[in-house]
Structures are given as C-alpha cells and as structure tokens.
Image: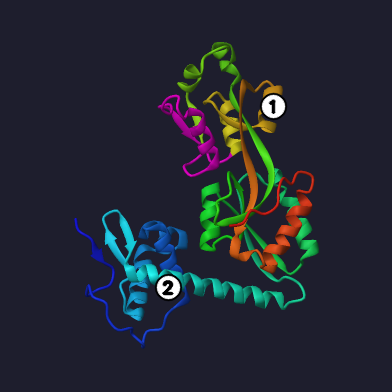
Amino acid sequence: MGQSHCFDGGNESKPDRQQPMEFTHLKSFVAVAEHGHLTRAAETLHLSQPALSGQIKSLEESLGVLLFERHPSGMTLTASGKRLLTHAKGILAAMQQMRHAALSLHSEPTGKLRIGTVLDASFLRVGELLARAFTRYPQIELDLHQVVSNEALTGIRSGDLDASFYFGSMPDDLAGVKLRQVLYKIVLPSAWADELAGASWDTLAARPWILTPEHSSHRQLVLGLFAGKQDLPERIVEADNESVIKDLVESGVGISLVRQELAFASSSAGRSVVWPGTEVSTDLWLAYAVDRAADPLIEAVLTVVRDVWADSLQGEEQCS
C-alpha cells in the first residue's frame, strides 16, 4: 500500500481565510504529531477518530498546507507540517502562559486541578493532601483520577491531567518531585512454600504469575525480573491494583511482586511467603509539565505535597 495525504486534492493551496483556526485544532495537530497515529491521539484527546480526522482536515484547509501523510502504520508529518508544528506548540504554550498570568492576578490560587493517582489513597497520603489543600487553598478544587503510570505521563502531556503520582524514572520532558523509594518483594502463596522451598528461579518462573495491565510500572518491574532469563510464563493473571494482587497471591492463584509493607504484613499473618533474596525498587514522584512550573495552581499543590511528604522527600524538581 502506498502513502496518501490527509488533505483532499493532494496539493497545497492558499489558506482559507473564511475558515477560522481553532485552538482545539492546534491541540489535535500536536497530539497526532506526537503519537504518529490517529487512533492513539484520539484516545488521548477523548475524541472519536472521525472527529479528530475532521479537525486535522479543517486545520489543513484553513492553513492551505498538507500537515500529514498517511501510511498503513500511521501518520507522518510533511515538511510543511514539521515547520508548522513548532509554531503550533508555541501558540499552545503562549495560551498556557496567559492562563498562568491571569491566575497570578488573583490574591489566592483559584481553579481546578486534575491529579492522577496510581495506588491506594492511604499509601499516597491523599486524605492528608486533600485536607491540607482545602484548608490552605480553599479556592482550589481537586479532582482525582485513578491511572497507571504510563497513562499518568500521557495525561500530563495532553493536558488531561495537571499533575500525577508516578512510579519510575522521570522523563526529560516532564518535571517532578521525588517523594520516596518504593521496595517490592516476590511473594508466593503460603500453600506453595514447602514445594518451592529452595527451588531455582526457573522453577519459580514457570509457575503462574499475576501482573498488572500493560504500560503499568508494576508490569515493567516484573518484566525486568524475567529479562535475560526466560520468556514470561504461559499462565498470566491480570489484576489492576495491588490489593487485588495481594489477595490473589494469598488465595493461591499465583506469584507476584508486592509492595514491601504489604508483603511483610501478609507473610507475618501466614497468608503468603516472601521469596528470600530478591528485592526490586522504583521511585514515587509527583509529576507535572515543565512549562507549568510557574503556574500558581501547580505551585500550590507542590507546596502541599512537600508538607505532606516532608518526612521522606528525596529530591528537588527534575526539569528539562
């Protein structure tokens, strides 16, 4: 199959001055350019594919240039698209800066913050965070959204999330505050303890394992255990949160990585067994977009997060 252009007619033309350029169309243009695929960009923007395709076509007609070429595997920028992408990002950044400037005119930060959460609320200290935020910044409304770590980064980049808790290494294009290191242990059902006592890794790996969905940090930690050793086990059970994973291990369904605090509590109660010698670690962050570091709303939530996590803060912001 050959490539085809998004813009009908196959040739660039003069801009359509009768058709206004929409701010949302620029956002869609940047999203498709970053994802290289209409489907993934539509999911990020919470739009249908036809709606997103229509926005791209409308923008191309408004500008009078071809922005993308279609391929069986996705979409790539034309030479014109590459040049205009820089301008589009600049316009979006300028709009964001104008919003920040307007917010700074208020005596107190005012607005809504959408924050992603990646684990149970108690571990993230969400209750204390909300209580302090409401007391210190009564004009700020906080909305919480449960996500996995990869969704958290995607949400911040797209603007669907203002900030999010996140496990892993901080990407260069984002900023964040490192809250603490999180340790995980390999945990297996107590009913398997005698049978697997002294067993090799290959024997352990051949048993059923419980993993979180794709693109989650927990799954990546488990995959790291298998790297260079052998393929993933044929029998995999998926669960979407750590409480369910712990319950499944205790019920004899399979083996998994469990956060150290939960692993030791379960083992002490005789409901599971911690595999000796193996420990996996990752970092917990509160992440946000670099260009929003001066946003009064982001500054406010960072102030509260630093207060709540003062006993374990591990580092200052990492910015590109």
Q: Quadrant of the N terminus?
A: bottom left
Q: Residue at x 55, y 38 (%)?
A: 218
Q: Residue at x 46, y 69 (%)?
A: 27
Q: Which mark is residue 264?
A: 1
Q: From which residue to which does the magenta span run? A: 212-241
Q: Earlier in the sequence, mark 2 or mark 1?
A: 2
Type of residue at label 1? Phe
Label 2 SS: helix
Q: Residue at x 57, y 40 (%)?
A: 241
Q: Is residue 128 visible?
A: yes
Q: Is the residue 268 above or below the residue 33 in the image?
A: above
Tell me: 151 left or right of 144: left
Q: Which mark is residue 25?
A: 2
Type of residue at label 2? His
Q: Residue at x 48, y 69 (%)?
A: 89
Q: Quadrant of the C terminus?
A: bottom right
